[in-house]
Amino acid sequence: MSTRILERLREETAPQHEQIEQNPYAKAAFDQTLTIDQYRSYLAKFYGFIKPAETKFMAEDAVNDMGLDMSMRMKSEHLEEDLMHLDMTQDEINQLPLCSRLPELSTPAQIWGYLYVMEGSTLGGQVITKQLMKFLPVSPESGIRYFHAYGQETKPRWTEFREALLSNGLNDSDEIIDSAKETFRLLDAWIRDSA
C-alpha cells in the first residue's frame, strides 16, 4: 500500500477529527473546567464505545494477520484501571452502558480504519495527559492510563502501526478511510449523547 493512504487518512478524516475535539468534555479539559466527576463520565463514555468495539474486532480472524501485537493495543483495560482509580467498582464498570452503534469491523480494511482512529488518539492523548495533570488529581500511573497508554513508547508504537498498515497488502484505501470516518462519527455521537 502506498504512503498516500496515510496522507489521505489525515486529510479526509480532518473534519471528523476536528468535530470530536469540540465535544463538551474535551473543551472543558482544555478550559481547565472539567470536574473529576465529568472526567469519570468522559472515561466511562470511552469505555462504553471501546470495550464492545474491541470485543467485536478481536473476534475476527483477520486481526491475527495484521502484523501487530493486539494485546498491547487494547485500551479498555486502561479505562477500567482509570475508572477504578476514580472510585468505581468493577461491578459498577460492568454495569456501564455499552454503545450498540459501532462501526462495521468485519473486514481487514474496516479494522485498519478503526485502529487508525484509536492508535492516532494516543498521540493526542499525550497532550491531554499534560493538560489534565495541571488541574485534576491524576497521573500517568493513576487515573490517566488511557490517555497515557504507551507513555514514552507512543511515537514508536505509532510508527509500528503505520508500517504495519503500509505493509498489509490491502488495496482498499477507500474502505479504510470510510471506516476511520465512521469510527470518528459514531464515537463523537456516543460521547455527546447525554454529555
Image (cartoon, rainbow, N blue to C red):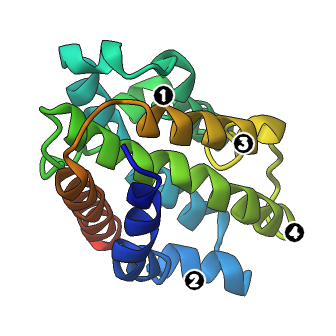
State yes or no: discs 3 and 1 in contact (Cβ < 8 Å): no
Q: Which badge, 3 or 1, is on the more N-terminal residue? A: 1
User: Which residue carries the number 1 mark?
Assistant: 74
User: Which residue carries the number 4 mark?
Assistant: 134
State yes or no: discs 4 and 2 in contact (Cβ < 8 Å): no
Real-space CA distance between mark 4 and mark 2, rounded to the nearest whole angstrom? 15 Å
Real-space CA distance between mark 4 and mark 1, rounded to the nearest whole angstrom? 27 Å
Let me know if residue 48 appears in the view: no
State yes or no: discs 2 and 1 in contact (Cβ < 8 Å): no
The amino acid pointed to by label 3 is Thr
User: Which residue carries the number 3 mark?
Assistant: 154
- Horizontal side of 11 relative to 119 (left or right) equals left
Please tell me whether mark 3 or mark 4 is closer to you in this view.
Answer: 3
Real-space CA distance between mark 2 and mark 1, rounded to the nearest whole angstrom? 26 Å
Q: Nearer the viewer, residue 104 or 191?
A: 104
Image quarter where the N terminus lies is top left
Q: Which badge, 4 or 2, is on the more N-terminal residue? A: 2
Q: Secondary structure at mark 3?
A: helix
Give percent across and percent down for residue 45.
39, 54
Q: Nearer the viewer, residue 87 or 173?
A: 173
Which label number is shown at residue 25? none
- Horizontal side of 30 relative to 97 (left or right) equals right
Real-space CA distance between mark 3 and mark 4, rounded to the nearest whole angstrom? 21 Å
Q: Which badge, 4 or 1, is on the more N-terminal residue? A: 1
Above or below — where is 150 with respect to 74? below
Q: Which badge, 2 or 1, is on the more N-terminal residue? A: 2
